[in-house]
Image: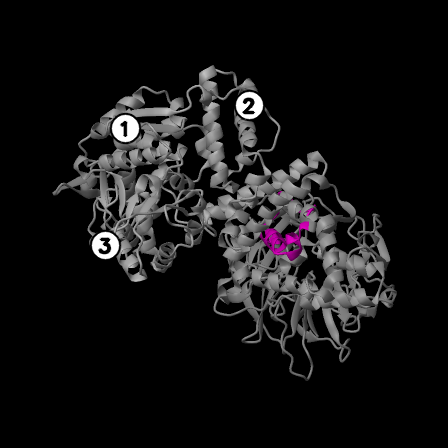
Amino acid sequence: MQCWGNARDGQLGIGVERNPVFEPRNCHAFSGRGLKDIACGGQHSLFLLHDGSVYTCGSNSCGQLGHDKAGSSPELVGALDTQKITMISCGRAHSMAVSEQGQVFAWGAGEEGQLGLGSTEMAVRIPRLVKRLCDYRISQVMCGNQHCIALSRDGQLFTWGQNTSGQLGLGKGEPSKLSPAPLKSLAGIPLAQITAGGDHSFALSLSGAVFGWGKNRAGQLGLNDKQDRAVPCHIKFLRSQKVVYISCGDEHTAALTKDGGLFTFGDGSWGQLGHGSTNNEPLPRRVLELMGTEVSQIACGRHHTLAFVPSSGMVYAFGCNSHGQLGTGMLGDARSPCPVKLCTVTRVICGGDHSFLLFSNGQVSTPEDFRVTNISKTLSPINYERLNSWRLKLMCTTDSAVTNDIIIQLSSAACWNASFLDQSDDIHFKTNPKIPGIDLNSVRVLFETLSKPAFSGLLEQASKSFESLLIPQLPRSPPDVEAMRIYLILSEYPALQDSKNYIRLTIPLAMAILRLDANPSKVLDNWWCIVDGSVFTRMVDMYKSIVVFMLTGGKTLLVPVFYENYFLATLRLLEKLHKVNLKAQHVEYNHFYIPDITSLVDIQEDYLKWFLRKADIVSDSLNLCAYPFILNAQAKTTMLQTDAELQMQVAVSGANLHNVFMLLTLEPQLARNPYLVLHVRRSHLVSDTLRELTMYSDVDLKKPLKVIFDGEEAVDAGGVTKEFFLLLLKELMDPVYGMFTHYKESNLLWFSDKCFVEDNWFHLIGIICGLAIYNSTVVDLHFPLALYKKLLDVATTLEDFRELSPTEARSLQQLLDYDGNDVEEMFLLNFTITRENYGMTEVKELIPGGEDIAVDKNNRKEFVDAYLRYVFTDSVEQQYAAFSGGFLKVCGGEILSLFQPSELMAMVVGNNNYNWEEMEKNAVYKGEYTATHPTVRLFWEVFHEFPLEKKKQFLLFLTGSDRIPIHGMESLRIVIQSTTAEEDYLPVAHTCYNLLDMPRYQTKEILRRRLTQAVEQYEGFSLV
């Protein structure tokens, strides 16, 4: 080794020399003996050999040498002979050593409790075991002037000693600690390194998050102020720099980044920051003079700094040189990095006012690179090798200490959070509220290993650790995003899917997630948005299964109060996932449906309780209606009917809501006047309907509809009603009235801003859509999803416009995506919109004075927003208001809040979840026909051979709509009856009854031809 700097107390270990050493000098004390590490205190030094023995020299004023020999040359600390020491550290006048077993030994000055021995002895001259840390395997200990910080293998931090400036990080007003105290505020963060300065401390995470606390008089915490901090604070400025190593001086700090950059901050009065001045720097600042090079090692003394550049093999020194500690051979401090003449470097070390260099004699050795994190020196990552060694240990021993050690690590969030870093392209350094920085694939692979029979003992151990330690200890407010990876990791644990573990693991995990404060909760939502669809689907399916489990067997396993809490947590977690899905679109909205609910729960009763709870009449009870996204069409229809019944009861009896339950058991209101009856003439359909509807109250509109056509028999088994809907809509949609604009490209309709009818016609269409819902009739109205979004107060987006007018929307998207700066010249747009009405072109301003405002790079977003606002809102305000007024008259109220826009749309116009086999299974036959009749068999053969579009055309031909009722194919019953007509005749559809009159065709070819002709000739009732 080589040494230089202050030698007054023998701290350089070169004998009786007391004068400062201004240039590196060889010291042969350990030649050929395998020197591994050196630690420098205020005026003493510790030397660690590869065989685990410790030597010390320098001042022994407080017993910091651990022996009573003269301190001018390194002497063995005999009291540590029985231990194999792996790590050493020094404070101003105290020393620490960590053994292979993770035990900590302390000696030297103890008046501030810095030895952690529970006492305030002035001098402890023989190393003693720090008993308070015996239960933990310590991997790192660092000493400040009069305080210490330790990191255990399972990621726990401990601090002790003086706390006058908050350097223990335990919070405001905490006294000094004589024994190690857990520092819980960084719990769960996978730490790579801890370090201490004079009276300040730092912790660095594996993904480069830097936390500092303690004294900040000179800005040494890098927080851009001079206030001391009593708790760890995140140094945001360094977050994006990929910091991999930190070193602290008395009142300054140096940070090394992965790409070899050096940042310094804090006290600069001796030039120790290397910025060419003696100014203090309260913010981390890059040392410009070393910018073109890569630094791989840094070390800070009291007032000086060393940096090693491997490409040139040079060590640079800057700062105080009053004792020659820079090693430049010159007097005077250096404000900028100065080269030090040295032989080959393995490692640089400094502390106090002296410096050391380790080098290997004779053989070529590569210098250490502080940028390479040796994770085994910090935490115990959980990987295949570790699992396997644990498995073997468990097989060979029954020692509870071994099991205990395994449990501690399995239940450590920090160990899990450290274990699956996404190393590709250094992604994990980018960990932030949008990027978790872990590779979930490797999580899955590890858990698959753990699920193999050979690991069964360990799997049970893991489950126990999660159940009793890890999950219950997950905090409300994790200290950093890196501490939140555990939520993604645990969600992948396969045992969660086993119903045996629902109560012990899966629901408690949901509870821990729901406990999170708003910000961390949002972070988890962001991460769920970007996880693989299959990961998300698995979670949704798992918690859906738990709902069914809770409704079936779960009740018997828990006392009622627990049952309700556990059930509620499950539903609330699904609700959280559902909100994420609205944004991320991982699965279709109906993936959240739990069909079993309709058979396990009395939906009518549940809805009533929900209704009363909304009205603040009952407070208790858990309602599934409060989580409508899990309820399918069948359940929602039951709710609609219950709501209608409820509204009628209340309206007719003027009833007090408190009597609702009683009311429902009395004679239902429907019995008195059970139908909404409309008398209309076919020749005056629109005016008659408008007249009839004004005679009824809003509540009446919820009753089943019966239509009587003037002069016809008043039998309505649903067919007449359906015909009424079809005829009325055909009339209302007639292009002559110009009520709607037809977008050819999408085949959809939207309100026209120029029409020739009164608003009450739009009002009528709104009522018709509402009536269609209450009468379970599918109407063929080609409106986009945007309409249903507006009805539910959900904002419309460019995506909605894309559905209505794909080309226009594509142009708007191109405008938003354009990278160039010449938006104005390229697109030549201003804040106007051009519309064509009956052959006339009109230009409308989107904002006042819009014709004179050009669209440029800065305002293009506002232009697109204004464009959409015009199309969906401003241009059709009156027409839409009339339509929604009509619709909400029938379907308004609390009940509407239970629907998603796509569900509401499906209630009105049906959906396209086709199941043609189901349609065949439910078909009814009349006349000569049966399911096995040759013609019927031919019909189904032909039908199943039709392509999808042709099948949909047939549906339109037969039922008046190419979509199916929200209840699915089983609710669509088609009737096929034989006729005496010859084979030349086409089949005839009676749309109102879903009835097909079909001649007895003899061959498949004829049947195919006739059916195709009939289907293709059908015009339908819609505008298109």
Name above or below for residue 210 compared with residue 733. Answer: below
Q: Which residue lies under the disc numbered 3?
A: 984
Seen at 58% across and 36% down, the residue is 601
* Residue numbers of the magenta segment: 471-499
**Amino acid on which the number 2 mark rests in the picture:** Asp
- Camera-side mark, 3 or 2: 3
Separation of marks 3 and 2 at Cα, in angstroms: 68 Å
Few, some or many residues within 10 Å of mark 2 (<14, 14–19, 20+): few
In the rendering, which numbered label is found on residue 712?
1
Q: Are marks 3 and 2 in contact (CB under 8 Å)?
A: no
Closer to the camera: disc 1 or disc 2?
A: 1
Q: In the rendered view, does 424 fall on the left or right side of 204?
A: left
Residue occupying the point 50% across, 66% down: 425
Check disc 3 and give the amino acid type. Answer: Asp
Q: Is residue 246 above or below residue 230?
A: below
* Spot occupied by residue 655 in the image (x, y as percentages of width and height): 50, 16
Q: Which residue is mark 2?
A: 616
Front: mark 1 or 3: 3
Residue in the picture at 23% in, 26% down: 687
Q: In the image, residue 936 lies at what x, y percent?
A: 37, 54
Picture coordinates of residue 849, whole percent (x, y): 20, 37
Viewer-closest of 774 and 85: 774
| Numbered badge on residue 164 | none
C-alpha separation, residue under disc 1 versus residue under disc 2:
49 Å
